[in-house]
Amino acid sequence: MRFALLFFLLPLLQAKTIRVATYNVALSQSSEGRLAALLRTGTNASAKRVAEVVQIVKPDVLLLNEFDYDANGTGATRMNDRFFNVSQNGRDAQDYPHRYLAVSNTGIHSGFDLDNNGIVDRTPGDQNYGGDAFGFGEFPGKYAMVVFSKYPIDTEAIRTFEEILWKDMPGNLIPPGFYTADEQEVFRISSKSHWDIPIEILGTHFHFLVSHPTPPVFDGAEDRNGRRNHDEIRLWADYLTPGSAGYLSGGLEEGERFVIAGDQNADPTKGDSVNAAINQLLDHPRVSGEFVPSRTGITTASNRFDTATFRLRADYVLPSNEGFQIEDGAVYWPTGSQEGASLVTVSDHRLVYLDLKLVPLIDEVVQDLSVENFDQKLVFHWKAKSEVSYRLEKATNLDADTWIRLDQVDIGFNGNRATAILAEPSGRSFFRIVAYYE
């Protein structure tokens, strides 16, 4: 008996593709609860423009930055039910039955003079208060974020990192001498929050890693915001790097799918970010950072990768190398007389999206494989998944350009066990199991 078995998982054209987007919508208001109130009637002009952009792009999973938090989720519910799920100017309504929002560090007072202006202002409503909050905000929950999804969210498995202290990050860039020892005992690294949200799809999941680091400006010579922006971005890099996430109580296991999304306030080549901060993610070995979405509606190379009117690439959707194949993506930015140009000016940022094809991973679709030689036949057994289709292929050379589909081989299923039986080959052969999503 001379044969070899090779596991090879091939994504086919009909594999499931999802559209994932991030959008800083600049809907934050001047006082707590005001955004939810403005969304009550479904007529707010800014929210209608945001909703129409979303209805044009039609993302399956969407992060909104700068959407004020309220504890009951009233604002998010109204945004879905009265804007996204109501046709705007004849567009197709988009329903997001699964949503996630949580406390943001913006506007949560620290009890200290964090901006060192000589004032400890504990009364919400002005910049002095905001400057002493864990993340700048004139009231608790300003500039927060919310996730909308057409797919279920595994709420029991969500991880949030809003209370991680900056001082606990090894090798942090805390500006020397700016914060007192007492301030460092409470000061949080995340200016809003960092969330790991598992999104369930086709019997598997991916981790939606979302955040909104502070802008690297609005500070002084100490560059406290630039340094913090760097380390907020670094948090996700540490989360993905084995052995680097001890201060996070563990990172994301290798082999897990993920998508990093959000307004990172950092451009790889321009702007005020520290040490090209975003390259910590773009160059990370687990991140697929080579594909750069470009602006729609632009015909020149100048600034075609910008995502904001201040001429920087600030907003990102970055998938894992494993488990996804990038099909397409863009920065939705119509201009001039182009359709939608009057909508996008609702914010200084533009919606960024990627179309991601879900690629099967070996350990989630073929498990407990065994091969038997019985009565001049090869019998393959493995634990299968009901959401996945399988077939066998054969070649006489491992490097063969063409593999022969063994369509005559019937793959039988008994519960979650798959069995394939084929005649033992007379010569040297290589076999592979091809798994794909239909």
Image: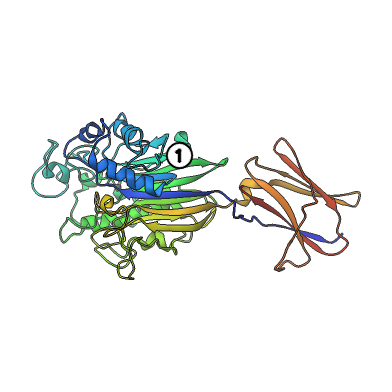
Colour convention: rainbow
Left/right of residue 168 with respect to residue 272 in the rendered view: right
Q: Residue at x 41, y 37 (%)?
A: 96
Task: Check the picture and name the quadrant holding the N terminus.
Answer: bottom right
Which element is circle 1 on?
Answer: loop
Residue 41 placed where, x, y %?
25, 30
* Image quadrant where residue 135 sits: top left
Above or below for 307 versus 98:
below
Of residue 213 and residue 148, the one placed in the foreground of this image is 148
Left/right of residue 368 with respect to residue 80 in the rendered view: right
Left/right of residue 378 with respect to residue 164 in the rendered view: right
Residue 70 placed where, x, y %?
27, 33
Of residue 113 and residue 395, the one placed in the foreground of this image is 395
Q: Residue at x 73, y 62 (%)?
A: 403
Left/right of residue 400 with respect to residue 322 in the rendered view: right
Q: Residue at x 45, y 48 (%)?
A: 251
Residue 82 placed where, x, y %?
32, 33
Count of numbered circles on the image? 1
The answer to whether residue 206 is visible is: yes
Above or below for 366 versus 282:
above
> Most extreme residue toward the left, as rendered?
118
Of residue 353 and residue 372, the one placed in the foreground of this image is 353
Above or below for 267 versus 75:
below
Of residue 96 and residue 374, the one placed in the foreground of this image is 96
> Most extreme residue toward the right, as rendered?
375
Residue on which the image places disc 1: 150
> Most extreme residue toward the bottom, as rendered?
301
The answer to whether residue 172 is visible is: no
- CA neighbours of label 1 inside 10 A, class few (<14), some (14 to 19), many (20+): some
Residue 428 placed where, x, y %?
83, 64
Q: Residue at x 74, y 53 (%)?
A: 392
Q: Amino acid at mark 1?
A: Lys
